[in-house]
Image (spheres, coloured by chain):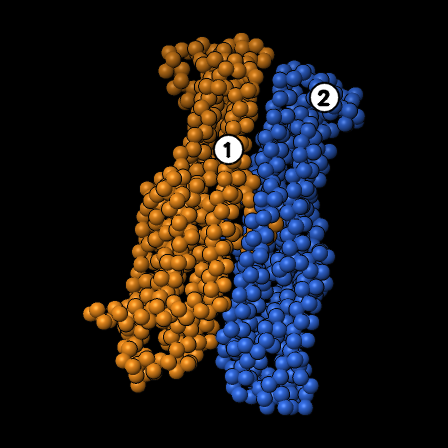
């Protein structure tokens, strides 16, 4: 038993020595390490800059709101509120869809505005080459480094004739393969060290949530291990190292470059109505419910009768509260219901499109990795939707709080030409308090599923080691 | 000619080379088809929105087009559709058309509060970027060139033929140049044939297609030159392949991503948010100041409304729309600064073309296809112009207090699509030319010295 591990260890050590002697591989590894470090530093710096800008905008917008003079509350409903989406700390590692989603929403009464000023819309096309984050380096470039280091692992021995030599000296191909795998497993650990360190430090100092940070290290480790095992296996099967390189780079190209681009093209065929069509549909639905300006409208007549009965009066003029404010609140309630329904439908459609792409995660571990990474970093589309949901809930509460001020503080009769309420009221309107979602709770299922896919891939590839070793033995004879 | 045919037969006998060319042809075809269908989808969306807008407008006309209808109400409740159809070359390079809205409705209210609205986009689908001809050209064509070029010289040496080839009467280098040219020609033909078919289908202008093809030729020539240069060093095939893929990573992935990271920090664009905050402040402040504070500067700007009936009562549409226009005017400086920061990003992106042929090609093809950031800004400019037409249309009704009736809805100005703004930017073209010329010159001089 001990002898076997000795042999495997010796093979692994030899492979390491060969890699360390190869100047090109050392330089490439160092470049990648430098890239990872600079991407992490740049990522933290950029994330903090973005967050600081958003915080600054939020603070100045809140301040402006509180500083408004005495007004009619309905004016403030249209003065509105700007809310800005805070950026998760782990966004330094994976920016996810954040650059493609607007980060600020203008909230006002009876309208649902879009999230605007996404980075992608305000950048040149350069942004579409990808954003330099540790996630980009680990997803796109690190597999290539693994390929470049490992494509000759076995095929090179074959070309030099040392494969037969080793077999003749009694080194079983399975031990040789195990040794090579151990060597490249160590290599994966080395590649992963800088980003893992960054994540662990971020978690230890309490800057980033520890659970997601650790899971990020795990999924990227699995991902690179998959590439390392695949590279060694292809190298063992290829006749020449050049063939191994071509096969591996082709696989990389299909999985990392081609599939992520072509799948969305298929998904985009699923129809989605534009915002304009949704606005028009909501407008038509509202018109169907009733017209509050029409005295004979059945819906609002019923609402009037109910309100009068509630306050025990005969005419709206006798109400102790402001009637048009009550109508405004009812209108807001109706529109918000429609907003919620249409938003749910739109998100369901979006998820149907994404489901089509994500389904291929089973085929391509890269897709599973990207999804899990965005989820853990809190920059996936679900986190954005959670922000939008919180924003809409807040918008409703905010508008209704102002409407209630109108109901209670504006006189129902003889309010004068320009009724206003005191500016102190604006300070009592709550400001938007974003609750960052706990990604393990919100995205736990999806992360677990993607983690399972990555694990199955790794296990399946490792299961291939035995048959490949048998083939090597046959070759060596 | 006969030699060329032999060379061709020799090249295509290599399974890997043949497969690479076939794959590139298939991908180029698929990309052109995907681009055409994405263009068609966008056109269909615009038609669909126009139909819905027609319904909405009819409802507004019915509700507000009364004999004593007030123009103020009509202008408040009537939305006007603008749209930006894909250019006939957009199928080849969709650029930002997947994230920038190409339909937008505006009203007579302050434009700056309406101009930056977003359309429904699925960010997860947009994240990897569109699959179109530009992608195949910039990312995949170099890889095909690498497959064809990496063993140009070393393959002969490894097969033991190099000495025999050097002994031929052809001067040294000419053989390699001919072979490289043949590979360049092959890659270009499989790449461009689908593009030309697509251009015919989309009825794209010949000049645009020609410039696009020229850019493709220069870009592929750069990679062929690089392949020849690396091949002429005389290293093993595997080393050449690794070196070329390494260059691809640096030039196509790394320099653009680094450039973007630097650019987004060096040129911040937070002014967009600043200007909308300022515009809101200006518009709502107007409710708290005397009427004259709004109307005096407005009338100074529009003397034609000087003699019209004065604004009275608690609320008046004249004052309302004047205050929206003045709100826009008050942030004109900030809008200009915001636009300048966007233009600066675009300018530096084009300059990056001196460093990376991929960045140069990207700037070029999308400018030619009119689907980049400047294209969207041109669309925004056309919306602003249309908004001014709306003002010119509604103001006479509002300021002369003329009734706005049903028939007036038929006179509403219609948005005229912007003129195509596709062009050939000089900076990235020079950058690409310089890079390609330098690489090819280096390759030629180096390959001359390559002998057995």
Are the residues flagged by discs 1 and 2 from a single subunit? Answer: no
Viewer-proximal residue among B191 and A151: A151
Q: Nearer the viewer, mark 1 or mark 2?
A: 1
Task: Return the residue found at the far left.
Answer: A1
Left or right relative to B430: residue B139: left
Dot 1 falls on a residue whose secondary structure is helix
Q: Residue at x 71, y 60 (%)?
A: B430
Residue A361 percent location from the top left of the image = 38, 58
**Which chain is in orange here?**
A
Screen quadrant of the N terminus of chain B: bottom right
Which hue is chain B drawn in? blue
Q: Position of residue B425 (x, y in %)?
A: 71, 56
Q: Which mark, residue A197?
A: none
Secondary structure of the residue carrying tag 2 is helix
Q: With respect to residue A19, does B52 lie above or below?
A: above
Residue at x 52% of width, y 35% of height: A52
| Chain at numbered mark 1 | A
Note whether A346 is above or below B315 in the view shown. Answer: below
Q: Residue at x 47, y 73 (%)?
A: A246
Q: Residue at x 62, y 20 (%)?
A: B287
Near mark 2 (Cα within 10 A), the count class, few <14, some 14-19 or many ≥20, is many
Q: Which residue is mark 1?
A: A55
A420 vs B257: above or below: above
Residue placed most toward the observer, B27 or B303: B27
Q: Quadrant of residue B138?
A: bottom right
* Camera-side residue of A95 and A180: A180
Q: Chain of mark 2?
A: B
Q: CA distance from mark 1 to mark 2?
A: 36 Å
- Where does the image place residue A214, in percent across and percent down from the top left? 34, 48
- Find disc 2 in the rendering and name its residue: B295
């Amino acid at each position: 038993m001990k002898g076997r591990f000795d042999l495997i260890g010796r093979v692994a050590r030899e492979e390491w020595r060969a890699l360390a002697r190869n100047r090109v591989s050392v330089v490439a590894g160092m470049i990648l390490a430098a890239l990872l470090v600079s991407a992490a530093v740049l990522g933290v710096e950029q994330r903090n800059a973005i967050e600081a800008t958003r915080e600054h905008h939020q603070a100045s917008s809140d301040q402006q709101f509180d500083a408004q003079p005495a007004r009619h509350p309905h004016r403030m409903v249209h003065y509105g509120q700007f809310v800005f989406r805070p950026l998760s700390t782990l966004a330094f590692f994976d920016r996810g869809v954040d650059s493609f989603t607007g980060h600020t929403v203008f909230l006002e009464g009876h309208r649902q505005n879009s999230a605007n000023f996404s980075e992608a819309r305000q950048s040149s096309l350069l942004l579409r080459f990808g954003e330099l984050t540790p996630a980009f380096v680990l997803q796109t470039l690190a597999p290539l480094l693994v390929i470049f280091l490992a494509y000759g692992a076995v095929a090179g021995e074959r070309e030099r004739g040392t494969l037969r030599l080793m077999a003749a000296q009694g080194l079983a191909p399975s031990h040789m393969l195990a040794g090579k795998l151990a060597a490249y497993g160590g290599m994966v650990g080395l590649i992963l060290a800088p980003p893992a360190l960054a994540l662990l430090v971020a978690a230890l100092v309490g800057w980033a949530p520890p659970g997601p940070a650790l899971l990020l290290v795990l999924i990227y480790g699995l991902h690179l291990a998959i590439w390392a095992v695949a590279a060694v296996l292809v190298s063992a099967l290829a006749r020449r190292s050049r063939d191994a390189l071509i096969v591996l780079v082709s696989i990389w190209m299909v999985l990392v470059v081609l599939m992520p681009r072509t799948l969305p093209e298929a998904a985009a065929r699923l129809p989605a109505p534009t915002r304009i069509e949704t606005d028009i549909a909501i407008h038509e639905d509202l018109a169907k419910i009733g017209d509050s300006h029409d005295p004979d409208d059945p819906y609002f007549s019923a609402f009037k009768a109910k309100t009068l009965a509630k306050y025990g009066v005969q005419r709206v003029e006798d109400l102790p509260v402001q009637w048009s404010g009550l109508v405004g609140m009812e209108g807001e309630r109706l529109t918000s219901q429609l907003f919620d329904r249409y938003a749910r439908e739109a998100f369901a459609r979006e998820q149907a499109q994404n489901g089509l792409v994500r389904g291929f995660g089973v085929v391509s571990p890269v897709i599973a990795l990207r999804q899990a990474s965005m989820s853990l970093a809190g920059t996936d589309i679900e986190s954005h939707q959670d922000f939008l949901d919180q924003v809409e809930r807040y918008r409703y509460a905010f508008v209704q709080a102002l409407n209630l001020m109108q109901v209670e503080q504006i006189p129902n009769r003889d309010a004068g030409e320009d009724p206003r309420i005191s500016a102190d009221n604006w300070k009592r309107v709550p400001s938007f308090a974003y609750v960052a979602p706990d990604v393990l709770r919100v995205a736990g299922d999806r992360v677990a599923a993607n983690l399972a896919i990555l694990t199955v891939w790794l296990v399946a590839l490792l299961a291939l080691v035995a048959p490949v070793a048998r083939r090597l033995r046959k070759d060596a004879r | 000619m006969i030699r060329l045919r032999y060379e061709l037969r020799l090249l295509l006998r290599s399974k890997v080379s043949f497969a690479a060319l076939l794959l590139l042809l298939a991908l180029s075809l698929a990309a052109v088809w995907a681009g055409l269908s994405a263009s068609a989808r966008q056109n269909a969306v615009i038609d669909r929105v126009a139909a819905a807008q027609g319904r909405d407008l009819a409802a507004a006309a019915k509700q507000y087009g009364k004999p004593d209808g007030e123009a103020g109400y009509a202008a408040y409740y009537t939305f006007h559709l603008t749209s930006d159809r894909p250019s006939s070359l957009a199928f080849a390079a969709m650029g930002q058309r997947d994230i920038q809205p190409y339909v937008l409705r505006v009203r007579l209210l302050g434009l700056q509060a309406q101009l930056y609205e977003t359309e429904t986009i699925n960010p997860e689908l947009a994240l990897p970027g569109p699959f179109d001809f530009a992608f195949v050209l910039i990312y995949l064509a170099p890889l095909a060139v690498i497959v064809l070029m990496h063993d140009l010289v070393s393959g002969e040496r490894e097969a033991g033929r190099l000495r025999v080839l050097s002994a031929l009467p052809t001067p040294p280098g000419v053989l390699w140049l001919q072979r490289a040219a043949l590979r360049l020609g092959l890659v270009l033909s499989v790449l461009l044939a689908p593009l030309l078919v697509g251009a015919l289908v989309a009825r794209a202008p010949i000049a645009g297609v020609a410039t696009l093809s020229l850019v493709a030729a220069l870009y592929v020539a750069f990679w062929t030159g690089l392949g020849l240069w690396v091949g002429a060093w005389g290293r093993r095939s595997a080393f050449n392949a690794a070196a070329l893929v390494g260059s691809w990573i640096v030039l196509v992935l790394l320099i653009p991503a680094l450039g973007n990271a630097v650019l987004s920090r060096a040129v911040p664009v937070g002014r967009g948010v600043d200007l909308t905050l300022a515009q809101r402040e200006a518009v709502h402040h107007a409710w708290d100041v005397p009427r004259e504070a709004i109307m005096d500067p407005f009338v100074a700007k529009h003397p034609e409304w000087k003699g019209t009936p004065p604004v009275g009562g608690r609320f008046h549409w004249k004052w309302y729309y004047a205050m929206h226009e003045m709100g826009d005017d008050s942030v004109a400086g900030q809008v200009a600064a915001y636009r300048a920061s966007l233009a600066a990003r675009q300018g530096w992106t084009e300059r990056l073309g001196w460093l990376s042929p991929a960045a140069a090609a990207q700037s070029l093809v999308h400018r030619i296809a009119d689907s980049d950031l400047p294209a969207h800004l041109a669309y925004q400019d056309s919306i602003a112009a249309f908004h001014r037409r709306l003002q010119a249309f509604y103001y006479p009704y509002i300021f002369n207090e003329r009734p706005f009736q049903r028939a007036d809805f038929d006179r509403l100005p219609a948005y005229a699509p912007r003129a195509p703004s596709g062009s050939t930017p000089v900076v990235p073209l020079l950058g690409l030319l310089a890079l390609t010329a330098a690489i090819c010159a280096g390759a030629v001089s180096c390959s001359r010295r390559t002998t057995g």
